[in-house]
Amino acid sequence: MDLDLIKDYIEYEQSIAQNDAKIFVKEEYVIPDTLPDVESILMLDVKPMITNKEVGTDKVNLEGQLQYTILYMAKDSGATEAHSVTYNGNMAESINMVGAQANMYCDVELNIEHMDCVIINERKISIQGFMVCRCNGYNINSFEIVKDVHEGKDIQFLKKPMTVDKVMEPIEAELVGKAEMKIDMEKNECLKVVKYNVLIGKKDVRIHDGGLKIEAMATVSILYKGKNGRELFCISDNVPLYKEVTVDELKPNMEYFTDFCLNSFEYDVRQDDMGESRIIDVEFIVKATTNVMYKEEVEVIQDGYSPTKHLDMETKENNINVIQGHGYNECIVKGDIETKNDDLKPVKVIMTTGAVTISDKYVKNDKVEVEGVLKVCVIYASEDDEHYLVNMEDEIPFSAKVDIAGTNPNMQAVASVALESIEGSLEGGNINIRAVVRVHCKVFYTIKNKFVVSMSVNDGEVPKKKASIIIYVVQPEDTLWGIAKKYLTTIEEIIGLNDLYDDEDIKPSQKLIIPGRAIV
């Protein structure tokens, strides 16, 4: 006979597959006829961007673009000058990821590991190197359990409270940034934009009833070549980002973390009221992905029986990921870059950019320790007339600690880092680097638990009970639940007959009055 079951869902995030894969890049490009021949390469800037991702069985298919900006030196009218050219290349890769399943969620991060620009001849260059693609695939799993029974007064349940993680689907939002960047009169007009850089900092995400507010500050830097000269100039501006998102299920007590990613960037150089090219309009889109989780206490049925019916119960064991916690920390990364050539000592830092990657992570008691590398690129001006522009690259290691209560080395962690700000300044002939890196860690572990997933009444005959009572001697391992189930009675009846208070109020060798016993 079917019972009118009250059911509930257990939801949890399950990390299924992870993989770090190297992607080899090789491209060849021809310098446009409008630009002079290449003499030497000063800088190669590569910006990867994912436009589409699709998860399949044991793999992730990626589509995207790579934007290559090359700053090179050339002889122009007898003088050495810097020129820039930008190319866009398409990317289509299939990344192996054992355990991946169709339609699962997947976070993908692309980092440039090493990229070279080689001169084939004065009109042709070759770009080759490696990117590291870091994939983290996960599902939001759910399964149905029996929570109770309607009109089940004669059914006895042994329940225990259990705290489960409820995980919502990621909330995606696009934040649009716009700015009118003006070049002051102390700098030359803009002839051509050479390079741009966007860092997202001062992030503030707040959940309220029915929605969330996302705020951040984007630092936009534009490197350009000036008119009437060969110098490069850099201008920067802070662009506020703001977005409100309505999600009815959100509550203020929920936990969350948000990742930010630059999705697109466009610029346009135009003239001011004086007819000079001193205004650069920028418009860009930042994608913010918010993952929301919260703890919920549910009563889980451990056992059940009926004094009047035979019950058939189906249980199922599940491996559940439990989120121990997550946290942030901001660390300041400092370092000095020494110039290798005394003849090319810096006199002015023009532009400083960087990128951060994680090299290792360790889960310890109540914390996660993260080790990483800050890759720095500095363009500076020197006093040398021919080599008046110099590009230097270096790596600065750093470490950070994120406190998360209750963690231990047996747990697993997922970590991410983001560069929020970076600046370079001259100190004692060297270039001093100061950056702010934000580290986020989430720690989880796996537990096994049995849940009642189905229950019905067996039509077989129920053992009858004698009308008489018996005296039962309590054994060391006994509980009132076990005694009541054995003799097809209830805990309440045993407590009432024996003047007890609760399940803890019995002791070995104690004698209990049992209201009838089963004939077996």
Image: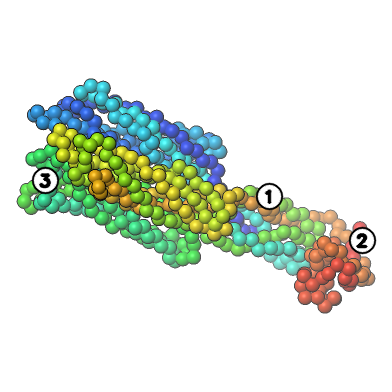
Q: Residues within 10 Å of mark 2 (few under 14, many from 20)?
A: few
Residue 359 image offset from top left, x and y in percent: 45, 42
- If the image is split into quadrants, where does the N terminus sit? bottom right
Q: Nearer the viewer, residue 311 or 444?
A: 444
**Does residue 192 appear in the picture of this structure?**
no
Q: Nearer the viewer, mark 1 or mark 2?
A: 1
Kind of residue at badge 1: Glu
Disc 2 target residue: 519
| Residue 317 numbered mark, or none | 1
Q: Nearer the viewer, residue 58 or 126?
A: 126
Disc 3 target residue: 188
Q: Are marks 3 and 1 in contact (CB under 8 Å)?
A: no
Image-quadrant location for residue 496:
bottom right
| Residue 177 numbered mark, or none | none
Q: Earlier in the sequence, mark 3 or mark 1?
A: 3
Q: Are marks 2 and 3 in contact (CB under 8 Å)?
A: no
Q: Nearer the viewer, mark 2 or mark 3?
A: 3
CA distance separating discs 2 and 3: 102 Å
Q: Is residue 204 above or below residue 272?
A: below
Kind of residue at badge 2: Ile
